[in-house]
Structures are given as structure tokens and as C-alpha cells.
Image (cartoon, rainbow, N blue to C red):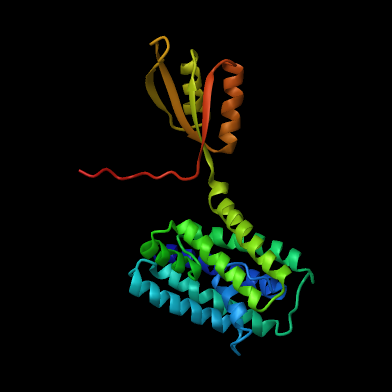
Amino acid sequence: MIKRIFKEYIIITFGALLAAAAIFFFMLPSKVAIGSGSALAMVLSNFIPLPVSVITLLINVILLILGFILIGPEFGAKTVYTAIVVPLGMGLFEILFPNFTSFTNDPLIDTVCYILVVGVAMAILFSRNASSGGLDIVAKIMNKFLKIEIGKAGAIAGMAVALSSAICYDSKNVVLGVLGTYFGGIFVDYFIFGLNIKRRVCVISPKLDEIVQFILNDLHSGATLNEIIGAYDKTVRKEVITIVDKQEYRKLMDFIRKTDPKAFVTVYSVSEIRYQPKVY
């Protein structure tokens, strides 16, 4: 148990430090505020004589306190831990690289690199049921009191931070911040959900027995058989439903094409599968 928790927090720490690296090495040098608590800290650092890491830590602590007061203790130890580790990681980089400017000297390339690296970092954190805190907490507060969906609330908060950079930076940086916030959200969603996409395949065929045997014995996957009735001719048929990953999907489709090219096949994308325990 202790070993598993220790391993989990090692992974969370790595994800948090990767996010801190993305902020320090790409977002801060570019002066492009891509909607996040750290972006808000970057903007505020123009008026508050403190390092961005310290301002980020203060923002996260304030938001965590507000979250606990307004929403309740639902954030969990992992989110609290990550909200502290990210600014501490930024502070470490500030000490190790005190005069760092940019790898590329191009705000656009820095923005793209930030989106790529932070997308991987967020995917690591979400895989361990953690988040970076910050604007995630703002989104939950907006969801509770303004009844705005969490996804939309997060987008609104992020865009507000990106637009706030107009106070300090030129229009090019503001536009890059807005675009970075939008495409960054899409990219993070892809890393969180897209890499785990599975296919729900439904097949109706006269050679259903052969297809079912292939699913069970060759793909070693599960399947469900449903009895269906055609609305036009009232004919009773059977349909098999299975959920497969990308490689299994290709093998299954190849087998179906060879076995019954005229089989009726429908395919759906599945981003998450949950097994609910039975309650008696």
C-alpha cells in the first residue's frame, strides 16, 4: 500500500515539475499569458515585486482556501500537493537559471512548445486523478454558483487571464495568449482522452458465430449478443457488440472484411469505461 502511494506521488511530482518546466522555459520567456494561474502570476509580476513562482504559490493557496470554503474539501491531497509543487518547481528553475531568456527567441515557437509540454504534464497528472489547482478551482466555483459547465467555466477563466495580458503586453502576445489558451485546451483534452480512445463495434452478419469466436479467441476481448428485430421486415437477427483498442479494431475490421464483406457494422468512439459495482 505504502509502496503504491509512494510510486503514485513520484509520478505526480514528475508531472508537476514538467508543468513547471513548461511554464518557466516557454511561457515566461514568450510573455504569452496562456490561461492558467501561472499566466495570471506572470501578468501580476509586472505590478508586484515578487518572483512569478511566489505569486503563483500565493494565487494557488488563496484559491485552495476559497475552494475549501465555497465548495468543500473535495479537491483531495493530490491537487493540494500539485498546486504547491508546481510553483516550488518554478522557484527551483529560477534559482538554477537566473538569467534565462528563451530557447528559441520566438514567442510563437515558445507558445507551441509550451502547449506540447504542458499537455503531456496535464495528462500525467489527470492519469493519477490530480490537477494543477489554479483555474480548475475557479471553474468549480463558477460551476457551483453560476451553473456553468466546468469545461466552459475553465475556458472562460482561461480566456479572461489571456485577455488580461493586454494591460502589460502588446497585441501580438495577447492574440497568441488567446489562441494558445484555446488550442492548449484542445491539446490537453487529446492527451487526456484521445490516447485512451477505444472503439465500440456493433456487427450484424449471417456469419456472426465466426466473428464472435474471433473476438473471444483471437482478440481475447469480451462481447455481448443482442437480439434485434428489423423494423422493415420484422426479421429477428442477432447483433454482437464489443469494445476494442486501436490495434484490435484494425484486426477485427480486417477479419470482418474477409469473412463477410457485406456485414452491417457501426463504430463509436469510447473515451472512458467504468465498471460499477453491484449494490444489493
Q: Quadrant of the N terminus?
A: bottom left
| Residue 15 visible to an observer of this rendering | no
Q: On screen, 238 above or below 233?
A: below
Location of residue 173 in the rendering, given as x and y in whole percent from the top left corner: 70, 70
Which residue occupies 20% across, 43% down?
280
Q: On screen, 201 above or below 47?
A: above
Which residue occupies 63% across, 74% down?
165
Location of residue 56 in the rendering, given as x and y in whole percent from the top left corner: 54, 78
Q: On screen, 161 above or below 182?
A: below
Location of residue 181 in the rendering, given as x and y in whole percent from the top left corner: 61, 62
Location of residue 95 in the rendering, given as x and y in whole percent from the top left corner: 65, 85
Choose top left, top right, bottom left or bottom right for residue 121.
Answer: bottom right
Return the residue nearer the eye: 179 or 245: 179
Return the residue nearer the eye: 41 or 10: 41
Which residue occupies 50% across, 21% down?
211
Side of 74 relative to 176 (left or right): left
